[in-house]
Amino acid sequence: RSFLILNGPNLNLLGTRQPEVYGPTTLADIEAMCTARADDLGVSIVFRQTNHEGELVDALHAARGVHAGVILNAGAYTHTSVALMDAISSIMLPVIELHLSNIHAREEFRTKSYIAPVAIGQICGFGAAGYTLAMDALLTYLGDMS
Ligand code: DQA
């Protein structure tokens, strides 16, 4: 069983990007945390980042038949992308919306998510730990844990 962990724009800069908001952890650190958690959970992961909206759409389409579910931190596209919303609606895979920061406690424009209505749920505000929480949540959703 495989999970796709998909990261959108500017998340390649984690560690140096607004550390007061997003913390000191790099995306490579997060990938290592997810790989370790995957070993514990007995799942495999593909961990990706792209700054390009269309590549996120392509990656969601390509997840069909390959991955059991998707953990998506769409970055700022969360707040703008009807294309991502439509892609999620189209792939028939469970998607968990993830954010490092609590998007509901920041600027007003971040409280709007095009992902939320088509995701199975949202995890935000727990920093890097949210990634492994999302992996646990996805496995629970898929019925492997009680
Ligand atoms: C983010 C929150 C978004 O509002 C922001 O544009 C990001 C990161 C987060 O992980 O907290 O790029 O998705």
Image: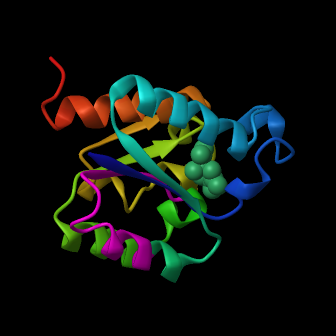
Quarter holding the C terminus is top left
Label tally:
0
Image-quadrant location for residue 57: bottom left
Q: Which colour scheme is used?
A: rainbow
Could you say where residue 142 lies in the image, as x and y percent from the top left?
A: 16, 38
In the rendered image, which quarter contains the N terminus? top left
Q: Any magenta on residue 68?
A: yes
* Residue 16: quarter of image: top right
Q: Is residue 16 found left or right of 146 in the rendered image?
A: right
Relative height, residue 81 to residue 23 (above, below):
below
Q: Which residue is drawn at 38% across and 79% down?
A: 83
Is residue 6 shown to the viewer in this render?
yes
Rendered location of residue 63, percent (x, y):
32, 66
Q: Residue at x 81, y 41 (%)?
A: 15
Looking at this rendering, what residue extends furthest in the right direction? 16
Can residue 81 be seen in this snapshot? no
Left or right of 136? Residue 106 is right
Q: In this view, does 36 lie above or below 94?
A: above
Residue drawn at x 51%, y 78% is: 55
102, above or below 16, in the image:
above
User: Which residue is more in the foreground, 100 or 94?
Assistant: 94
x and y, in percent, of residue 13 in the image: 79, 54
In-image side of 135 versus 130 (left or right)? left
116 sits left or right of 11 in the view: left
Determine the residue located farthest toward the top in the rendered image: 146
In magenta, the rendered stretch is: 57-74
Q: Does the magenta stretch include residue 112?
A: no
* Residue 37 placement (x, y as % from top left): 47, 27
Q: Which of 124 and 68 is in front in this view?
A: 68
